[in-house]
Image (cartoon, grey):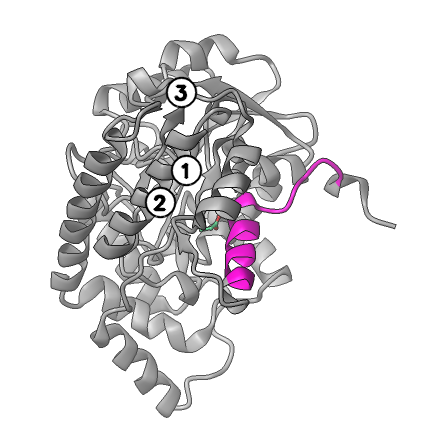
Amino acid sequence: MVAKRLSGVPASGTVALSNLVANLKLQGIDIISFSMGEPDFVTPENIIESCKESLDAGFTHYTPSAGIPELRKAVAAKAFSDNKIHCTAKNVLVTPCKHAIFMSSLAFLDPGDEVILPDPSWVSYEACIRLAGAKPIYIPTKVEDDFIVDPDLIEAAITPKTKMILLNSPSNPTGSVMPCNTIKRIAEIAIGRNLMVLSDEIYESIIYEGKHHSIAALPDMFDRTVTISGLSKTYAMTGWRLGWAIASENNIKELDKLQTHSISCCVSFTQPAAVEAITGPQAEKDAMVKEFKKRRDLAVDLITEIKGIDVNVPKGAFYLFPKYESKVKSEIFCTKMLEEAHVAVTPGSAFGPSGEGFFRMSYAASEEQIIEGLSRMKKFIENI
Ligand code: GLU
């Protein structure tokens, strides 16, 4: 009875693992989870207060499908000041980040189209591309290149069917941050070959070395780019499901059309709180990034002590993507680690063919958990 478009599309590896961990914890098993990419901090108080005020004021009904005007305006102003993207409120659609990727696939891809993306890449890109009937074309990246995609390989992979290049910097799962030159070169290719770019910048604020660059800010790129970002990671607001897409007015209209037929609009009382997040005090956000950097350094130090592990130092996001020496498939490797060491990490193969032989560790966990979890991991790996 199930539609053909769902065949060959697995459930999200990250979400499935997090469900499994929640279940094991319910059974009283002491699991240390490095599985889910979500900050362990509580959303800053000023944002929560703003949401409570909206609820108390009865702001509990539908909003305009594209989002409340104040939030669209605030996102456009932020995009201009932080990302140098020249846009107005009309270029912004307020929508959960993952939904923005899903809708962009439906709105801009036809069956048979090809989408070029770095490998490894976050689990849901391939699924969204396939659900639109299109085909992912993976460009392998390597640990020794800090997982930076080579623009020449992108160019070589272009065929008459190529419609889009999908980028994600800082990257989930590798934490790599694309240098400005790489982004410029990819922009040249997109312009020269008349391709769209979908740029997922959800980790834009979590960068430890280097700088974030938005491809839509480059000359002649705005109209062909959909830039996606949101509040989940920056302000520890994963459960709020609030983000945005920035694109040309026409493309935003098409995405909004899909929004009207899917979720209608984002949750009303969270939207004024999102304005507060973007325009209010940023000290807590900055403190979280500092804390993530400390945890990255700790996690890298501890994991490099494990024999048979090869890891690079990621410049952004909150993931390590270590390579392990054993020939065991990453899914089996991670299942065994969960069963025997009670440590949850995501198999690298969930992120694309180049992820085989790797696993993803989210270090958005407390220092105590990182120390205990990596000590368990060391015993497990060194006993294999
Ligand atoms: N993006 C996060 C992760 O990769 C949350 C789960 C998901 O949406 O995949 O862990």
Label pair 3/1, CB-CB below 8 angstroms: no
Callout 3, which amino acid?
Answer: Ile
Q: Position of residue 198 (x, y in %)?
A: 44, 35
The range drawn in magenta is 7-24
At 40% across and 20% down in the image, what residue appears? 191
The crowding category of the residue bearing disc 2, from other C-alpha atoms within 10 Å (few below 14, some 14 to 19, many at least 20), is some
The crowding category of the residue bearing disc 1, from other C-alpha atoms within 10 Å (few below 14, some 14 to 19, many at least 20), is some
User: How far apart are the two marked residues, 3 and 1, measured between alpha carbons?
Assistant: 49 Å
One can see residue 207 in this view: no
| Mark 2 residue element | helix
Label pair 2/1, CB-CB below 8 angstroms: yes
Callout 1, which amino acid?
Answer: Phe
At 31% across and 73% down in the image, what residue appears? 273
Please give the residue where the numbered disc 1 appears in the rendered image: 380
Please give the residue where the numbered disc 2 appears in the rendered image: 376
Please give the residue where the numbered disc 3 appears in the rendered image: 191
Q: Position of residue 362 (x, y in %)?
A: 35, 45
At 51% across and 34% down in the image, what residue appears? 333
Mark 3: C-beta under 8 Å from nearest atom of ligand 1 = no
Q: Position of residue 233 (x, y in %)?
A: 32, 54
Q: Is residue 110 left or right of residue 203?
A: right
The crowding category of the residue bearing disc 3, from other C-alpha atoms within 10 Å (few below 14, some 14 to 19, many at least 20), is some
